[in-house]
Amino acid sequence: MRKLIVSSFVSLDGVVDKPWEWVGSFFDQEHKQDSLTKLKDVDLFLLSRPTYEHFASLWPNIKGEAYFDHMNALPKLVASKTIKEAGWNATIINGEVTEEIARLKQGPGKHILKYGFGDLDRTLMLHHLIDELQLCIIPVAVDKGRRIFEGMDPDQVKLTLTDIRNFENGAAILTYVPSGSKKQ
């Protein structure tokens, strides 16, 4: 059974909005290598519409760097009711996203990876479809923007810490298993 792994940058004050504006040099070679290593266990990349639009406008143009080459080659699924056609090796999910993800998790293959944390992730979390939540804490205070669990009932956010990975630049990845996730 496949796992759905959600990985997101989070500022010290809990902001997840537009990380490309504040992550800066924290996504360095050490972090890219760590991310590339994790991609070896993934064969499908899930994106929300906003993340797809941002990544698809930039990432296909980055070539010759192992992390981006691997990411560009991965098949992608986009959760959107407004996009009708996708490029960048992507397919739009037709129908109910939670049903499609539940179906894909039951099928063969490696794990499914999703970057960022927004409305789609809140829905996936409420349906107990996220098996692993990797929060990359970036040591900056952003002050404005949507917070990671904003709008969620605190009773719906129950996490068990399973791993901590520290980076030389001060960032750290905290890996959690959400309570109620449909574990392997």
Image (cartoon, helix red, strand yellow):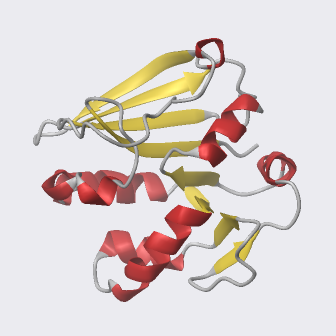
Query: Where is residue 70 shown, x and y percent of the image?
Result: 44, 73
Q: Is residue 22 visible?
A: yes
Q: Quadrant of residue 16?
A: top left
Q: Quadrant of residue 131?
A: top right
Q: Is residue 19 above or below residue 78?
A: above
Query: Where is residue 178 shown, x and y percent of the image?
Result: 60, 23
Query: Where is residue 105 shown, x and y percent of the image?
Result: 77, 47
The foreground one among 1 and 128 is 128
Total labels drawn: 0
Q: Is residue 18 above or below residue 86?
A: above
Q: Residue furthest front?
A: 144
Q: Is residue 137 above or below residue 116?
A: above
Q: Is residue 55 above or below residue 88?
A: above
Q: As drawn, is 109 to the left or to the right of 51?
A: right
The foreground one among 29 and 96 is 96
Q: As drawn, is 19 to the left or to the right of 126?
A: left
The foreground one among 17 and 33 is 17
Q: Residue furthest top?
A: 155
Quarter of the image that includes the C terminus: top right
Query: Where is residue 122 shown, x and y percent of the image?
Result: 64, 37
Residue at the location (62% across, 42% down)? 121
Residue at the location (52% across, 16% down)? 160
Residue at the location (71% across, 39% down)? 123
Q: As drawn, is 57 to the left or to the right of 29?
A: right
The foreground one among 105 and 124 is 124
Q: Quadrant of residue 80?
A: bottom right
Residue at the location (23% across, 52% down)? 23
Q: Is residue 184 visible?
A: no
